Structure formats: C-alpha cells, structure tokens
C-alpha cells in the first residue's frame, strides 16, 4: 500500500532526515519560514501532523499556547521528543494522519509541514476532510512544502496518469525508494481547499511555499 511504503521510507530515514535542513542555499528560507510560522501559529492550540523530527515545531511552539505534535513513525518521534523536551507546552504522540479521531483535544489550528507533497492528488480532499474534522470550526490550517527548484530539488523520475510526480531517493544504507512528491501551484492549492476553507493565502519563498486558510465556521 502506498501509504505504508511512504511511512516505511521515513522510518528508515529518521536518523538522516535533518541533513535536508543543512543545505546551504536553503538557510535563508528556513529562517524566513520559521519566522512566518511563528507568527501564524502564535497563541494557538495546534495539532501538528507528520511532525517528523520536530524541526519546525521547535521554532513555532514557544509562541503557541499548546502543541500536540504527531507522526506515524516512532523512529522520528523519538528524535522529536528529545528535541522538544525543553518545551512544557508540547506533547509528542503517535498518530496516523489519515485517522485522526480520538485525539480528543480542542485545537484551533492545524499544521502539516512537507506533507501535502506526499498526498496523491485524488486523496487531498478526503485528507482535508479528516484533518478539518479534528479541529474546531473556524480553525486556521497551515501547510508548508517544497517548490521544485532546478539544481536543488531531486529530479522528477516520472509523472503518472493523474499528474502525480515521483522521485527516486537513496538512503545511507543504499536502499532506493520511489517516492510520491507533488509540487502544487497556487491555483492547485486553492482549488484543492475549495469550499472547505475561507481567506486562503499562498506565499512563495525561494525554495518553499506556505499556504494557509481558515476552516468554515459551519
Ligand atoms: C517529509 S517528512 C516531514 C516531517 C516534518 N513535518 C518536517 O517538515 O520536517 C514526512 C513525515 O510524514 C510522516 N508520515 C508518513 N506517513 C504518515 C502517516 N500516515 N501519518 C502521519 N505521519 C506520516 C513520516 O514519518 C515523516 O516524518
């Protein structure tokens, strides 16, 4: 199953994941995005999904009211727990982004970093319904992800019939995976959110994009 394949890849990549954030050409964008997230998530009770090693959580969490940072993989959560242990308002726990019921907390903000790109185009809307259902009506929802940048991004290996794009990725142990990695345009982002969000924004940096909106008050 595609979802399990993706989860397995990230489980095996856990200890080498943060190397991506050491690329020299991305340092300015990392600073800008961290500052932008801090502003967007300030004083919010945040449900973060697919938090990975907690790289972005460490920047915005000090300004948030409370953060529940979740991921499917225990291997990345172990690193996130260590990294975020100094923050009393952060709780790190295991959760599948496709089955968010049962978290039982009162969130007014949802955040997912570098996750949208791993969703098949046909599965974005069902995923958004699931994500929104874990949040209070009128919540802020924020996604950040990669822009495709020639010479910096891993090349696209193929495009399927639905327009999903893939990359070959090699881990330190030599294993190779073909990973779904989409690079949505602003109009694709707006169309996917559609009626489920209002006040939709989309900001492009040099290497990253950030899209955010409020869920309807229903
Ligand atoms: C590209 S990484 C992003 C990590 C982190 N948000 C960041 O920006 O550094 C994708 C993350 O999705 C997690 N993941 C994979 N399948 C998942 C699932 N079904 N539910 C929740 N997280 C999942 C992986 O373990 C990995 O940490």
Image (cartoon, helix red, strand yellow):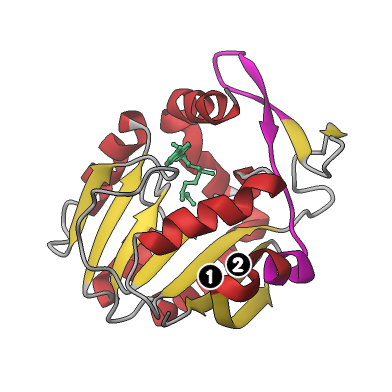
Circle 2: element type: helix
In depth, the one of 218 and 213 nearer the eye is 218
Whether pointer 1 and pointer 2 mark residues with C-beta atoms closer than 8 Å, the reply is yes
Query: Image quadrant for the N terminus?
Result: top right
| Residue at the image position 75 percent from the left and 39 percent from the top | 154
Left or right relative to 85: residue 97: right
- The answer as to whether callout 2 falls within 8 Å of ligand 1 is no
Residue furthest to the top in view is: 174
Query: Image quadrant for the C terminus?
Result: bottom left
Q: Which residues are magenta?
A: 168-190
157 is higher (above) or lower (below) than 182: above
Tell me residue 47's x, y (percent): 32, 61
25 is higher (above) or lower (below) than 18: below
In depth, the one of 205 and 11 nearer the eye is 11
Residue 153 seen in the current view: yes
Residue neighbourhood size for the residue with mark 1, other residues' Cα within 10 Å, grouped as few (<14), some (14–19), many (≥20): many
Residue furthest to the left in view is: 88
Tell me residue 182's x, y (percent): 72, 48
Q: Which residue is mark 2?
A: 29
Q: CA distance from mark 1 to mark 2?
A: 6 Å
Residue neighbourhood size for the residue with mark 2, other residues' Cα within 10 Å, grouped as few (<14), some (14–19), many (≥20): some
Task: Confirm whether the magenta stretch covers residue 188.
Answer: yes
Circle 1: element type: helix
Which-is-in-front pick, marks 1 and 2?
1
Tell me residue 21's x, y (percent): 53, 50
The circle drawn on residue 33 is 1
| Residue at the image position 61 percent from the left and 43 percent from the top | 118
Tell me residue 201's x, y (percent): 62, 80
């Amino acid at each position: 199953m595609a979802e399990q394949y993706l989860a397995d890849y990230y489980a095996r990549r856990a200890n080498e994941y943060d190397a991506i954030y050491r690329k020299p050409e991305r340092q300015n964008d990392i600073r800008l995005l961290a500052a932008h997230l801090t502003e967007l998530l300030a004083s919010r009770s945040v449900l973060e999904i697919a938090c990975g090693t907690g790289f972005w959580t460490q920047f915005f969490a000090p300004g948030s009211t409370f953060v529940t940072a979740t991921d499917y993989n225990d291997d990345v959560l172990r690193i996130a727990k260590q990294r975020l242990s100094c923050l009393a308002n952060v709780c790190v726990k295991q959760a599948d982004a496709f089955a968010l019921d049962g978290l039982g907390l009162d969130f007014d903000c949802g955040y997912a970093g570098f996750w949208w790109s791993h969703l098949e185009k046909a599965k974005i809307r069902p995923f958004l319904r699931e994500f929104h259902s874990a949040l209070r009506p009128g919540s802020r929802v924020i996604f950040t992800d990669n822009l495709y940048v020639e010479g910096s991004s891993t090349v696209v290996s193929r495009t399927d019939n639905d327009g999903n794009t893939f990359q070959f990725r090699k881990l330190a142990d030599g294993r190779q995976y073909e990973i779904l990695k989409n690079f949505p345009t602003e109009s694709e982002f707006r169309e996917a959110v559609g009626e489920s969000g209002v006040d939709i924004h989309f900001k492009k940096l040099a290497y990253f994009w950030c899209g955010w909106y409020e869920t309807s008050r229903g």
